[in-house]
Amino acid sequence: MDPERIDLHTHSHHSDGLLSPAELVALAARRGVRLLALTDHDTTAGCAAAAAACVAHGIRFVPGVELTSQWRGREIHVVGLDVDVREAGLVAHLAGLAQRRRQRLAAIGERLARAGLDGEGIAATVRAAKPVPTRTDIARELVHRGLAQNIAEAFQRWLAQGRPAHAPTEWPELEATVRCIVAAGGHAVLAHPHHYKFSNGALGELGAAFRAAGGSGVEVSLAGMGPNDASRAASLARRCGLAGSVGSDFHEPGLPWRPLGRFAKLPDGIVPLSARLGLQAP
Ligand code: AMP
Ligand code: MN
Ligand code: MN
Ligand code: MN
């Protein structure tokens, strides 16, 4: 028999996904997902609609968020699971992140203008559509205007680090981010460790700092991880005493390498983070 399908890392159109929360949940239901978290970048705006849709489909819902942070000056993402979306500290933290994202959007618009594009118009369009704008939204607008063939090219030409419209941004420190999630009653999970270009030693120090700050888990089974990435993530979990989380980092249906819904099989010796969810009073 198939193990349960679980997805604890997904995005809706409230951040840089394409689907509404209700559409995302309907797709999860079609794919047999039994436990689903919505983890938009720096916003919980889609959680209420996702929760309602999950009730209708008989899916267990986990309110979540993927918080942008930094450690040793490098950008790190932290997934918060089972957070109280009304908790005052979390609400304030998200308001700060939204403001930073709007400031970064304006800075990117200025840089696009310096490169000869209608940066102001592009920024205004994205700002009007998204209270918590992401670079993917800007990339989509560049594609929409025929200035790039696809999102990847928009990043390569303008938005990625080292490209003309990249705007360096300070994010909240890792420790403060983890503490915020824990204070909101949630579990903090180190997102996609294979994305960070750290040596094994530095990655171990990141895992230790994350655990010391109150972190609970690390993503050990994520779509897009190769066998080496997965075994490195599993060994990080074992070394640092972190539980293992699973997810797709789903953004849009057109990307077959990031299918919504993952089988919950974890490497030997890894405690599933999902077992710790839903234990709190509602
Ligand atoms: P942001 O958090 O606003 O900086 O946006 C980052 C998002 O852009 C990530 O979550 C990815 O979904 C996407 N992204 C980042 N780098 C690339 C890239 N090189 N090509 C395509 N998408 C990217
Ligand atoms: Mn994203
Ligand atoms: Mn991420
Ligand atoms: Mn993500």
Image (cartoon, rainbow, N blue to C red):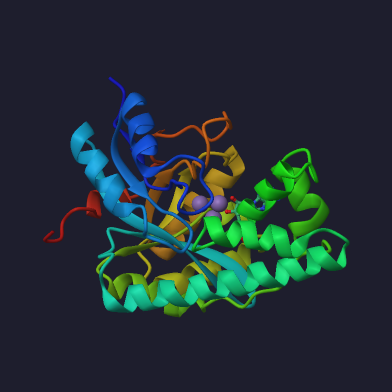
116 sits left or right of 58 in the view: right
Residue 200: x percent and y percent?
A: 62, 62
Extreme left residue here?
281
Q: Quadrant of residue 168?
A: bottom right
Up-down: is 83 above or below 157?
below
Residue at 53 percent of width and 55 percent of height: 129
Residue at 44 percent of width and 46 percent of height: 12
Most foreground residue, 271 or 48: 48
Up-down: is 39 above or below 107?
above
Residue at 58 percent of width and 62 percent of height: 127
Residue 5: x percent and y percent?
A: 33, 33
- Quadrant in which the C terminus appears: bottom left
Extreme top residue here?
1
Most foreground residue, 278 or 137: 137
Most foreground residue, 154 or 257: 154
Residue 166: x percent and y percent?
A: 75, 65
